[in-house]
Image (spheres, grey):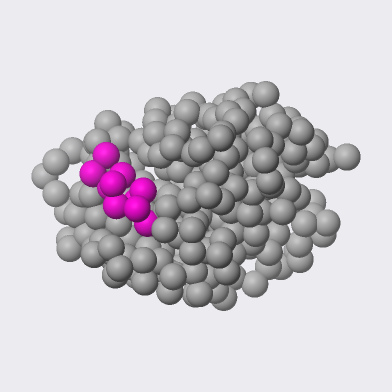
Amino acid sequence: MDTAHQAADFIRANLPGAAPRTLIVLGSGLASLGDELADHTVLEYEAIPGFTAPTTPGHVGELVLGNLADQPVAVMKGKIFSFEAAGINGMRVPIRAMHLLGVDTLFYSASVGSLIPEADVGALVMITDHINAMGTSPLLGEDEAAYGDKFPDMAVAYDEALRNLVRKIADDHAIPLHEGIYGAVRGPAFETPAEVRMLKSWGVDVVGMSLVPEALLARHCGMRVVAIANVTNLAVGMSTIPVNHEQTLQGAEEAKKHLRTLLEAFISRRNAE
C-alpha cells in the first residue's frame, strides 16, 4: 500500500460524516475560511501519513472535514510549496489521497501578484489557463498509472463548465471578477522586474508560486479544477510599493469577503448537480 492509500485510509477513519466530493485548498492568509465548516473535524497535517507541515507564514497545516452549504467538503488550510523541503512533490500525497476518497473537484485559491493594472490589490481573478515556469513537475519520475495516464491532457486544465458556474455566481452577487492566465514560478524569491516583463510578454496576467503542481496532479487523477486567485500586490515594476510576504497576507484580507461568498455558492450549486 502506497502512502496516498495510507493517508486516504487515515482520513476516511476520521470523517465526521459523508465523504467529501470537493477539495478546497486555501492560499496565503485565507486559512480562517476553513473555520466556518459545520460539524467539522480537524486533522493536523503532521498526523496524516505523507502530509508535511507547511513552513510558509499564513499556511496553518490543518485538514478540515465538515459541511459547507450543507455539503461535505475537505479544506486544506495551507499548502506545501515547491520551494519548501518536500519540494515539487509536497502536494502529491494530499491530492491523490483525496482522489482515493472520491473527491472529483478541486477548488483552489491562490494569492498572486497582478500584471494587469485593472486587477489591483483585493481583486479576484479566475484562472483560465497557466504557464509552468517552474522548470519541473510533480509528475516527473516513476510511472503512476494507478492514478492516471502518464501523459495527461491539459488542453482544458481549468474546467469550462465550472468556470461558467463561477461567472454566473459572480454576476448574481455583483462580485467583480477578472479572468487571466497564471504564471507559476518556483520562488521563494519574488520575481525581478525583467522576469515580470518576460512573463507579461508570454501572456501571463497573474504570477504566483503554487497552483500548477496541484492542477497537474488533480488533472492526472481526472479531477475537475477551478481556481480563483486573490491579488495581494501589483507585480514588481508596476508599483513603487516594495513586495513582501506581509503584503501578501494583508492583501488576502481584502479578498476574503467576496471569496467566501463565491465559495459557499459554488459548493451549494456544484454539489446540487
Q: Is residue 151 magenta?
A: no
Q: Is residue 147 visible?
A: yes
Where in the figure is residue 125, as x and y percent of width and height? 32, 60
- Residue 234 vs 157, above or below: the answer is above
Q: Which stretch appears magenta?
A: 253-262
Q: Position of residue 172 (x, y in %)?
A: 30, 68
Tell me: 88 left or right of 178.
right
> In the shown orientation, is residue 270 left or right of residue 18?
left
* Residue 139 quadrant: bottom right
Number of labels in the image equals 0
**Height in image: 6 above or below 25?**
above
Q: In the rendering, at what x and y percent does residue 52 appear?
A: 62, 30
Q: Residue at x 23, y 49 (%)?
A: 122
Q: Position of residue 49 (x, y in %)?
A: 73, 30
Q: Is residue 144 left or right of residue 152?
A: right
Which quarter of the rendered picture does the N terminus lie within?
Answer: top right
Q: Is residue 260 magenta?
A: yes
- Residue 96 in the figure: left or right of residue 5: left
Residue that sits furthest to the right in the current view: 1
Q: Residue at x 49, y 64 (%)?
A: 269
In this orientation, which residue lies closer to the viewer: 252 or 103? 103
Q: Main secondary structure of the magenta part?
A: helix
Q: Quadrant of the C terminus?
A: bottom right
Q: Nearer the viewer, residue 22 or 204?
A: 22
> Foreground residue, 118 or 21?
21
Residue at 71% in and 32% down: 14
* Residue 211 seen from this side: no
Give the residue displayed 27% in from the left and 31% down from the top: 246
Q: Quadrant of residue 248?
A: top left
